[in-house]
Amino acid sequence: MPGAAVIGLQWGDEAKGKIVDILTDRNDIVVRYQGGANAGHTVVFGGENYKLSLIPSGIFRSNVQSVIAGGVVIDPKSLLDEIDSLTARGVNIEKNLIISDRAHLIFPWHKIEDKIMDTANGHEAIGTTMRGIGPCYQDKVSRSLAIRVGDMFKSEFHSRIEYITGIKNRRFEVLSRYLNRGINLSDLDIELDAKRIVDEYSKLAERMRPYICDTTNYLLDAVDADKRILFEGAQGSLLDIDHGTFPFVTSSNSSGGGISSGSGVPPKFISKILGVVKAYSTRVGGGPFPTEQDNEAGELLRNKGNEYGTVTKRPRRCGWFDAAAVRYAARLGGVDSISLMLLDVLSGFDILQICTAYNINGRIFNHFPSHTEDLRLAIPIYETLPGWDEDISEIKNYDQLPSNAKYYIKRISELVGKKVEIVSVGADREKTIFLT
Ligand code: IMO
Ligand code: MG
């Protein structure tokens, strides 16, 4: 069975990039299959820090093929900027990256729509990354105004942009008037001028051309040849469009359900799923977050963990580990084991809390509520554990960890119901403890 996957089990930013990078050398191919430039994956090695948004975290190994599959939504400018900045740092992209001709393209109108429509229930902000992700997936699903990567090289590309621009401009006029949220289109800094967009995207298309192919066919051939494929999830399971904290979610299946639809590789070839979690919780943007610590403890987590968005630089909301939420995500993703990340950030806390269940209107919930209103009312039921003072960032073996840190790992494993396979004690590749 050739396929393995790495997925986030919280609200994103679990340090999936580090785990993908580590596992890459055991694989032939690394695939991004959903999301877009809303993702911010960090890989650190040899004293260098690399930030990736669209390009798979496997790109640093020259013998591994990186694939951006059809389920990803691609902002060409953002992609080419990423390619340029990695190339300038000596990373060889040309030979190692292929991009699906089925992936959908993000256009300037999607970013404008993201700004105008970033609201749940008409009043509360979702707090999106403003990268046009939701509007692009919306156009994909509704079909009539969508443009895919492969369309860039067909004869109707220019006329489609002109047609869509006309419709979108009319729509913005109406929406901005109707929503009356103080958004002035002229403030959005983008003039939807069809000719300008045609010129810009034609140039971007030519630069993308060498990377583009039918990645579905490529991956199906790889499956037949028994190649080892690693699937790199973006975002986290609790941001999944169907199973997350809707509507405060992203617009793709980030819980693992999107692997097959996004890549074309049938589910039966994916034999191992590794769930990645932080040793505490964070969330960017709006939506319920039961274990949030909007206090000194949260501030300490934010400072020690440098919890600021890779993509948007927003301070992340921080809180205690939520085992009830992660247990749900681990079952949903069918994960085999867990990678526990950023454990070093917890050094120095007198006590640590883990949420084991919720109290909602006097009823105990051991499962994750399906409606955000219930989750908003959820009072976490905590188990309190002793902390540790030692700096653990140089520790290489599980046995050398302070006993309270070992106990913390053990309780997470028990409460989530999965074994912990990897513990990370720092961003660098080297700062990784493998438990066998
Ligand atoms: P990685 O891959 C953390 C969040 C946004 C917002 C919601 C919807 O780095 O884990 P979107 O722009 O996707 O429509 O925003 O989802 N979000 C993420 N949060 N990490 C991410 O990716 C995220 N991608 C989207 O903050 O709340
Ligand atoms: Mg992120």
Image (spheres, helix red, strand yellow):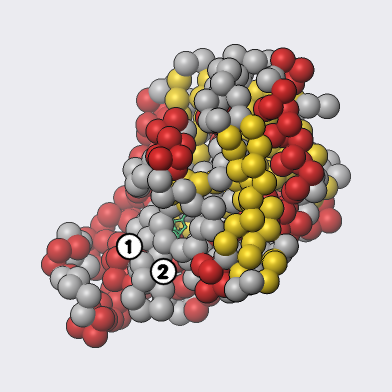
Dot placed on the residue nearer the N-terminal end, 1 or 2? 1
Return the residue at label 2. Answer: 135
User: Does dot 2 land on a helix, a strand or a loop?
Assistant: helix
| Disc assigned to residue 111 | 1
Which of the two residues, 149 or 86, is positioned nearer the viewer here? 86
Amino acid type at circle 2 is Pro
Q: Residues within 10 Å of mark 1 (few under 14, many from 20)?
A: many
| Residue at the image point whose x is 22% and y is 68% from the top | 192
Q: Is residue 418 above or below residue 154?
A: above
Q: Residues within 10 Å of mark 2 (few under 14, many from 20)?
A: many
> Alpha-carbon distance for marks 1 and 2?
8 Å
Amino acid type at circle 1 is Lys
Location of the N terminus (image quadrant) = top right
Which of the two residues, 402 or 12, is positioned nearer the viewer here? 402
| Residue at the image point whose x is 52% and y is 25% from the top | 348
Which residue is most to the left? Answer: 186
User: Does dot 1 land on a helix, a strand or a loop?
Assistant: helix
Residue 148 % position (x, y)? 48, 63
Rendering quarter of residue 81: top left
120 with respect to 428 (left or right):
left
Rendering quarter of residue 338: top right
| Residue at the image point whose x is 45% and y is 73% from the top | 139
Q: Is mark 1 within 8 Å of ligand 1?
A: no
